[in-house]
Image (cartoon, rainbow, N blue to C red):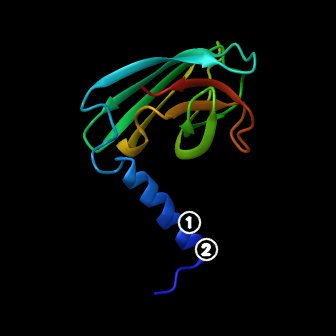
């Protein structure tokens, strides 16, 4: 069997995830729900909440934000914390605020591999490209 660069990288990443206990029932909230504050980043003034509803092997993430600038904003689950942001691991539905600056998004089917300590929910200044983050919450 011949393994090329990209395939090897994916296999190594999967091995690390598996070795950490994720992907084998190690992620998620154990069927529970957690609501955490979305805190402003980079002086954005954006705030709100992120609610994670664990539904077995996947979760639903509901984000509600206030004081959001106009336009569409990309959201993601990131590897790492708000203090040490890492790579994007799962895309969330975008948020486009109303005229009062309030917006929300519900994203279902988020793998429990990405739910727990060491991951964060983050929304960005724009949709494409997403640009700098404007709000973030660490996933408990």
Q: Residue at x 34, y 47 (%)?
A: 21
Residue 89, horizontal then vertical, whole percent: 53, 47
Residue 18 location (% of width, % of height): 37, 54
Q: Total number of numbered labels?
A: 2
Q: Quadrant of residue 114?
A: top left
Kindly state the secondary structure of the residue where label 2 is placed.
helix
Few, some or many C-alpha atoms within 10 Å of disc 2 (few <14, some 14-19, many ≥20)? Answer: few
Name the secondary structure under disc 1: helix
Going by the picture, which residue comes out furthest to the front?
A: 19
Q: Is residue 137 above or below residue 75?
A: above
Q: Residue at image x 70%, y 13%?
A: 45
For residue 9, which numbered disc appears in the image?
1
Quadrant where the N terminus lies? bottom left
Q: Which of the 4 quarters of the picture holds residue 47?
A: top right
In this rendering, would 76 be left or right of 28?
right
Tag shown at residue 5: 2
Please give the name of the residue rendered at 54% of the width and 71% of the height, measured from the top-left corner: 8
Estimate the spatial distance between the alpha carbons at disc 2 and disc 1, rounded to whole Å: 6 Å
* Image position, residue 107 (x, y; %): 44, 37
57 or 118, which is in the foreground? 118
Task: Quadrant for the C terminus, please.
Answer: top left
Vertical placement of residue 61 versus 108, above or below: above
Marks 2 and 1 in Cβ contact (< 8 Å): yes
| Figure check: 7 above or below 116 | below
Give the residue at x 51% y 64%.
10
- Any mark on residue 21, and which? none
Q: Badge 1 local density, few (<14 within 10 Å), some, or many (20+)?
A: few
Q: Classify residue 117 by image quadrant.
A: top left
Residue 124 is left or right of residue 22, and the answer is right
């Amino acid at each position: 069997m011949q393994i090329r660069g990209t395939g090897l990288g994916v296999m190594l990443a999967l091995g690390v995830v598996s070795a950490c206990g994720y992907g084998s029932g190690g992620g998620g909230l154990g069927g529970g729900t957690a609501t955490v504050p979305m805190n402003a980043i980079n002086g954005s003034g954006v705030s709100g909440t992120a609610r994670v509803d664990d539904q077995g092997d996947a979760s639903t993430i509901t984000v509600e934000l206030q004081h959001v600038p106009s336009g569409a904003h990309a959201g993601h689950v990131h590897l790492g914390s708000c203090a040490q942001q890492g790579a994007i691991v799962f895309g969330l539905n975008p948020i486009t605020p109303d005229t009062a600056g309030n917006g929300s998004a519900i994203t279902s089917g988020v793998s429990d591999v990405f739910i727990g300590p060491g991951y964060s929910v983050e929304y960005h200044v724009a949709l494409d490209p997403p640009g700098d983050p404007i709000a973030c919450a660490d996933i408990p």
